[in-house]
Amino acid sequence: MENFDYDLQSLQEARNLARQAKQAQAALAKYNSEQIDRIIQNMVKVAEENAVSLAKMAVEETGFGKVEDKTMKNKLASTELYKFIKPMQTIGIISEDPVNKVVEIAEPVGLLLGIVPSTNPTSTAIYKSIIAIKSRNGIVFSPHPSALKCTLQAAKLMNEAAVAAGAPPNIIGCISKPSMAATNELMKCDEVDMIIATGGTAMVKSAYSAGKPALGVGPGNVPAYIERTANIQKAVQNIITSKTFDNGTICASEQAVIVEECIRDQVVAEFKRQGGYFMSAAETEKVAQKLFVRGHAMNAKFVGRSAAVIAESAGITIPAGTKVLLGEQQGVGPEYPLSYEKLTTVLAFYTVKDWEEACELCIKLLKNGGVGHSLAIHTENPAMAMKFSEKPVFRILVNTPSTHGGVGISTGLAPAFTLGCGTWGGSATSDNVTPLHLINKKRVAYGIKDCTENTTSTVAACVAEKCATGAVSEEQIMNVVNEVIALLKKRGEH
């Protein structure tokens, strides 16, 4: 009976939040650019002030990652995001084409449902709140149950900051009694206009099957290829920096390292020098047994954990100061568990003969759970980077940590915590999601071609004229039609 009551309360809360936020959004839709910018500035300020406390809350509640890195993610989701989106035109006339006489006007999507993962709870809530308000949308969050308190707090702070700067009350809401029933209600209720889903594959598929527009993102299984011309010391440093950032909780982090035979020994030595530990086959098997449940599903107990925690749990001894664990794999698929996504400080390690073999292996790894997401390549040969641009991903990250590159810390990509995988990965977009994905475009189009004369009668008259002299072939009729089209185009130009 208690569970039944909880589910009813959860469902009712979801409905109330949706109604309140929808009403608030209708008011926000009338705001101008200056008003919206003032609101966002205050949200950014509050996010900055609470970046550390929210990071601490997230680590304490979930056990995932590191406070200093979650702090950085909170700042990326606010300060750095604001710098990137400030010049974006999301209100009123956003473009005018004087030649074709088309004017584009931005309209908000309406009310968004934001689904938040446990791996990046506070940064995702901050990021989605800000891009929603920038495009004059309201948003209601469905938090992951294991990250409820920190997500709720982040959403509360964003709503309070927005309202304090002039936004309508309840413009940002968050379920405090999470349940599948509540999430499903929000996905399907009339008030919600679009879903932004960041989370597991099952959740993303549910979002796309809810019968309304959705922006969902798939998993990453990022291969990192160290090509023979690479700066090996820098490449290894980038990979370790990326994989240890928040202990690998970002889906753009590297999952497998691929090296050519000719540089293998140098790469192995460099990893060992910088804090990598190469596990034996027996140790790799022990770690894999801890990391995965139900086949290749990641065990939540080891998401975002340090190498030391994983090693201790698996009963293996590693040197003090070890940053990442590496396990050699000879193939891809169920028999090679490290060939799957591992949102923690463990990497698969592969040796190949040449770049062609590296290409084939990258494709196999991507098809093993990361198609459309990201690929990292370390090379001093620009032509090689372009060869790898042909792979089935939408982010080819060159000579940079893939975590930092994918979310826009170390590259010119849009700062984002929703990274689209395109149709290859089952996503509606291949972009890093920004406010421009959250607007409708209305178009005012002036007539530029004269269509006042009855085209059908013109063609008929021309054909009749030709027929007067005898039989007409199909080719002659097409010639007449083309003459008429050319004539109409000419009239339209004057």
Image: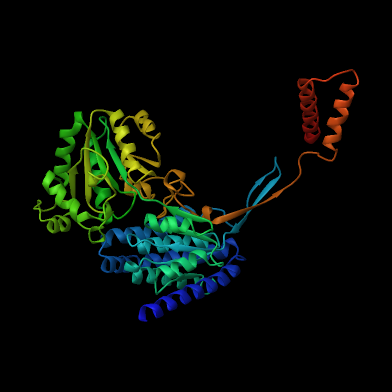
Q: Position of residue 333 (x, y in %)?
A: 27, 43
Q: Is residue 393 above or below residue 487?
A: below
Residue at 10%, 51% (x, y): give it: 318
374 lies left or right of 344: right
Residue at 49%, 67% (x, y): give it: 186
On the rendered image, what quadrant is the N terminus found in?
A: bottom left
107 lies left or right of 227: right
Q: Position of residue 218 (x, y in %)?
A: 39, 51
Q: Is residue 486 above or below residue 148?
A: above
Give the number of marks: 0
Quadrant position of residue 265: top left
Q: Is residue 113 or residue 237 the one in the foreground?
A: 113
On the rendered image, what quadrant is the C terminus found in?
A: top right
Q: Is residue 486 or residue 226 the one in the foreground?
A: 486
Q: Specify how the rendered protein is coloured.
A: rainbow
Residue at 69%, 46% (x, y): give it: 102
Q: Residue furthest right?
A: 468
Q: Is residue 466 or residue 145 the one in the foreground?
A: 466
Q: Position of residue 34 (x, y in %)?
A: 57, 63
> Is residue 166 something one can see in this rendering?
no
Q: Position of residue 87 (x, y in %)?
A: 52, 53
Quadrant position of residue 238: top left
Q: Is residue 302 or residue 71 the one in the foreground?
A: 302
> Is residue 444 something one can see in this rendering?
yes
223 lies left or right of 109: left
